Amino acid sequence: MTQTKAESAAQPGARSWLSRTLQKLTADDRTVEAQELRSDAAIAGCSAVSACRKGQVVTVTGRIKSVVYTPRETVPTLEAELFDGSGSVTLVWLGRRRIPGIEPGRRLTARGRFAAFEGRQVIYNPWYELSAG
């Protein structure tokens, strides 16, 4: 038995697809990017930054929003803000001035112990994997 468009649209799954499509068409770019990043994280089995707690070893994935080199008197640091759609975490590499491929706009997956420093969420010296494209 075949269904008409009206019958299939009356099904709950069809409504959610239609409302998701309409929402995506009317949403601003940041909202769409955040939704895509949250979806990518869920598919990859990564934790959402907003769900991470201090002391946990976590794997997060997202897009690098900014990269800052901070020369310090003791140890230079390279900091990258990683946004996953639910929140941001600062990835901090101690003793590094530059890491090839760590640049704004790049997608990456990072693993390490989640911490808090000066009111920021951070992961120090994370293992990381750059995504293609």
Image (spheres, rainbow, N blue to C red):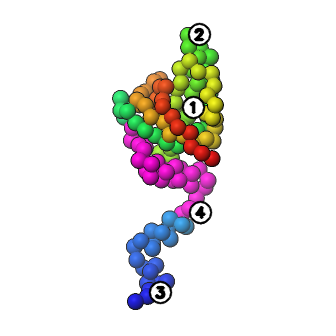
2 vs 4, front mark: 2
Residue marked by disc 2: 73
Amino acid at the residue labelled 3: Thr
Q: Which residues are magenta?
A: 23-52
Of 12 and 94, the residue lying toward us: 94
Of 64 and 15, the residue lying toward us: 64
Amino acid at the residue labelled 1: Ala
Mark 2–mark 1 distance (CA, rounded to whole Å):
20 Å
Residue marked by disc 1: 80
Q: Residue at x 44, y 80 (%)?
A: 8
The reply to whether residue 81 is visible in this rendering is: yes
Q: Secondary structure beneath disc 1?
A: strand
Which circle marks residue 26 in the picture? Answer: 4
**Which x, y percent locates residue 47?**
41, 43
Q: Secondary structure beneath disc 2?
A: loop
Q: Are marks 2 and 3 in contact (CB under 8 Å)?
A: no
Among numbered discs 1 and 4, the one appearing first in the sequence: 4
Image vertical order of residue 78 relative to residue 83, above or below? above
Mark 2–mark 4 distance (CA, rounded to whole Å):
49 Å
3 vs 4, front mark: 3
Among numbered discs 3 and 4, the one appearing first in the sequence: 3
Among numbered discs 1 and 3, the one appearing first in the sequence: 3
Disc 1 residue crowd, few under 14, some 14–19, many 20+, Cα 10 Å = many
Answer with left or right where residue 79 lies relative to residue 41: right
**Which x, y percent locates residue 52?**
39, 38
Which circle marks residue 4 in the picture? Answer: 3
**Which x, y percent locates residue 98?**
63, 25
Amino acid at the residue labelled 4: Thr
